[in-house]
Structures are given as structure tokens and as C-alpha cells.
Amino acid sequence: MPSFAAQQSLFRAYDIRGSRQQFTNDFIHALGHAFAHLYQLQQNIDSKKHSAKNSKISSENNRQSTNEKIIVVIGYDVRCDSNTIAQALAHILSQQGIQVIQLGLVTTPMMIFWAEQYQGHGIIVTASHSAKDILGVKWLVNHISPSSTDIQALYHQLGIDYAQNPSLDSIAKPIYHKQQQLPTQQVASAYSDAITQVFKQIYQHNNQTAEDSQLPSSKLDLMVVIDCMHGATSNIAKPLFTHFCQHVITLNDTPDGNFPAGNPDPTEPQRLKQLQQSVLLHQADIGIAFDGDGDRLMVVDNRGKVVTPDHLLYLLATVAVNQHPQPLNESLSNAQVLFDIKCCHHLPKLITELGATPVISKTGSSLMRQQIQKSRGQIIFAGELSGHFIFNDGYFILYDDAIYAALRLLHWLAKPLPAKPNCARNLADIIDNLPVIVSTADHYLPLPETALTDCSIVQQLARFCQYLQQLVHATSAAFITQPDPQAIISCAPLLCTCSAKSQYMTLEQAQKLLPVGTKLSCIDGVRLDFARGFGVLRQSNTSQNLTVRFAGDSIADLTDIQTRFAALCRPFNEHLATQILAIVAE
């Protein structure tokens, strides 16, 4: 009986993803049965809830509810073998009495859109922005993305299913529901039509006069260049954007799982060079790049410069706030904008100036979606440094759809300013008026070994910073009358019993590293916000690495913050401190 121990590493924080060699036939069959069990379990839960709410309804109606068929939509990305895996999963689910609706080649947001048309159940075989030899699976259960706990539970279900029946691949159960293959044109047109309706609603909500309540009679007067990176957006991007914009040029718009132009990851360094050159060549208003499965967005301005994700997040948050469909007599004073812990120090102030409340979040678009769903509409927008952006204003699906986010931005840019009624907004000029960000990229460092302790390096650093901050705050008032900057403090004994050795520093050193007013967040690693910059160090959710990012108002500020982080890490790991100092600005 296969143990699937080798496949455990595939089950990550947000999805299933890893090397093609690990997607064996046995594993795919077991995974199909685990998904069938998952959706059948969800149906039982829903049926019990339905029965509890309708206890007075006739037993016959209750039986009908219990026997309601399960509907799951299934799609796949452009990767070699994604289609094969999707067909295998669809076959197994249909054998288990589940009605499967096959979507074919789609983006992840398109799969979500179609799942929402039925019961909120969906699977897409995709490895998103990863290299060509990586495969993966994402899924939705009852409109909700899985948590890391849910993903691990699915892994454990593999062994349970095989223990109960070790010959899963030879089971010959009757097919209760035939698979339904939706026509490619129908899959695309329904999604496109829904987006078109969104902009009709936006114009109606944001224009008070009857003559202004419809979409403009002509297309947006914009020149747009789009890099599909040979991914799943390749078939839909040009027709959809051409519907809205007068001039659209597409790059790498043939689906190709070999990704001849490079990994379908628009956040990789130098990956947008072709897009930047094309924007300049065609004197375009904007350049847009999508990742492999269409849920991440990067943008190039009209001068050919990559817009930092921090600035892009702010621009899209501006769109969300300005176009929110709240009644005219109500304010957005309670509205919140969510951003992940790796975003820069300027964002909270900029979001506050929009009239919304900035809220910091753990990294992970699925975590953000779950937080939005629990906010009862209070969070109207969420964004992540990696290019995931989620609108929560009721116009469209609650998901990080890069195509949709790009179109929202384009319609906002094309709307003339009152001072210049005949001119669209100039993206580069808008960026020029935002605070300067001098930052490093989201940098990966090998996770240091901490074999001699019970705590990870991140936990040790968090406790060290918490102790220093408490000490600085406690002594800042007490030492006013009789300061003793050379007072020696021993941190480790009070801080963390698992530290390899005691750490010593003077109060003056502590105050220099963490001045009064420094903001510390430990919700996801360690983030420190200083007066003129910030730094973050956290453990990656998808690999055995630390991710670090630093930003300042100038190169000097950036260097200062890296130096502080290096000094804070040095007592625990000298090599890590050296690596931090070696990171250069973008």
C-alpha cells in the first residue's frame, strides 16, 4: 500500500504543489478519492444545517435536500500534464456520484467564477507562477479556499482511503453522473459578460445623472500592452481587453506549458523587461503582466518603469474606496483596507488619507480571503506584495482576479480629472506624487538550523525584540532623571529559555536598535516600523526559507534599517546577519 510519504511535502500552506515526478498515478487516484470524500462530507454538513433550519418542513422535502447531487467544476492551466491530471480527477469524482462540469483551460479566477454559479465547489490543476516542471492543485469547498489545516487534513485522508480499500484505482463503481464539458466559448463569454455588467453597475453607482449612468459609448482611449507569459490568460486577455480599450497589444499570448520566455512569474527580477521595452516602443499608457494562472498582477507605467507592488496596492485601494457602492448619505469611515506584513511603511498613512482604516495581515492571499469573509463587508479591499489584489464591494467574485483588477485600474485611469476633462490620468505622474520607496526585493534566505534550541530563529528574534522594546519603554521614563546608558542588561534568561547563549547589550545599544516609537508586529514573523522605514523577517509558508524585505525613504535609511536587523539577528546567527547586510536595493 502506498504511504505517500514522499508526497507530504506537496501539501503546502495554500495549495498542493511540487515536482512533476511526485504526481504518480497512485497519488493522483488517491487524491481524487480524497476530494470525493471532502465534497461528500461537505454535503452531509450542509444537509444537516438545512434540516436543522427547516425542521418543520415535510420529511419528503428533507430527503430531497439530502439526496441533492454534488456539483464540482474542474479546470486546468497550460502546463504539460495538467490536463491529464484534471481528466483523472474528473473521472474519479464522477465515479463517486459527483457531477463534474469540465471547464477546460482556464485561469484560477475563472474556475472560481464558475464554481460560484453552482455550489461553490471547484478544482483547478495549476502550479500558478512556478517553473514548468512544477505541478499543482488548488480547490474551493463551499465558496471557501482551504486553510493550511484543511490542506493537511486532505493529505491524511489519502492514507485513510487506501487503508480502507488499497485497490482504489481498480474500483468499478457505476457512474452516477456523466461529466459535462462546457464549450470553450461559453466558459469565456459568461465570465466576460459578468465583468461587463460590473462596469455598467459602477457607472450607475458613481454617476448621479441619467445621461452619465451608462458605459461610455466609445472604448477607453488607452494604449495597453499585456504580457500573458504564455499562461492561462493567453486565450482571453486580448478579446476581453479589446472590448474595453481602443488599442491593445499582447505579448506571449499563446498557451505554452514550456514557458519559452521564462517562468510565468511577473515578480521575478528582470522578468518584465520585454513588457517595459514594448510600452516605450508603442508609447503605451500602461503595461500589464499576469502570472501563469491569472491571479497575480504587475504593472509598468507609461515611462516603462515597473510600478512597485506597494504603489499598485495603494492605487487599487483608491479605486476600491472611490468606487465603493455605498449609499450617498453614508460614509466609508469604518471601511478597512487589508495589506500583508511585507508591504512598505508608507501604506498605512496613504490608506488613512483615503478615508479608510489600514489593517496589517499575515502573508497569504487565501488567508486574506478568509479574513475578508469574516469581516461582514468591513474590509473593502485587500492586497499583497506578491501581486494578489481582492475587491470586496459586491460587484464581482471575492477572489484575487488579476484580469479584473487590471480592468478596474484602467477604467479609473481613463476617467478624466475635473481639471483636465479631455485627458486620462497619467500613471507615471501619479506615481511621482507618491512617497519615494527605496527597498530591497522580497528576498529569500536559507532557513538557519536551530538544532540546539526548541525555538526557530524567527521565534527567538521575536522574543528578543519584544523584550528589548519592553525594556526601552519601561526605562525611558525611569532614566530621565538619572540616565545610565552603560547599564548592562542580560536578555536571554528573561527572554527565552531555549536561547543557545545569553545575550548582553547596554541600554544605550537597545535604545539605538529599537528607539521609542518603533512599532513591532509579530503576527507573521518579525516586522519593525521605524520613523523612516521598515523591515520584516518571516518564515516562508511555501519553502524552507526566510523571507526578508527592507525599505526606507532613502538609501541611507534603508542601510540603517538593514544594519539594525543584522545587529538584532547576530546574537542568534552570525551568518544570517552577514546575509542581511549583503542584500542590495532594487
Image (cartoon, rainbow, N blue to C red):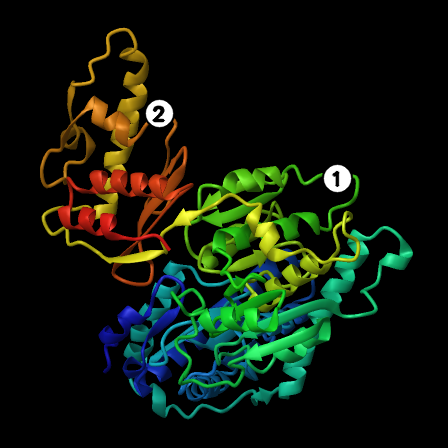
Q: Residue at x 61, y 56 (%)?
A: 427
Residue 522 visible within the image: no
Badge 2 element: loop
The image position of residue 54, as x and y in percent, is 66, 59
**Pick the front one: 56 or 509:** 509
The image position of residue 577, as x and y in percent, is 19, 46
Q: Residue at x 20, y 32 (%)?
A: 495
| Amino acid marked by disc 2 | Val
Gap between marks 2 and 1 measured at Cα: 38 Å
| Amino acid marked by disc 1 | Glu
The residue labelled by disc 1 is 330
The image position of residue 49, as x and y in percent, is 57, 59
Residue that lies at the very extreme toward the top in this rendered image: 481
2 or 1: tag closer to the N-terminus: 1
**Pick the front one: 479 or 425:** 425
Quarter of the figure with residue 397: bottom right
Q: Are marks 2 and 1 in contact (CB under 8 Å)?
A: no
Q: Nearer the viewer, mark 2 or mark 1?
A: 2
The residue labelled by disc 2 is 516
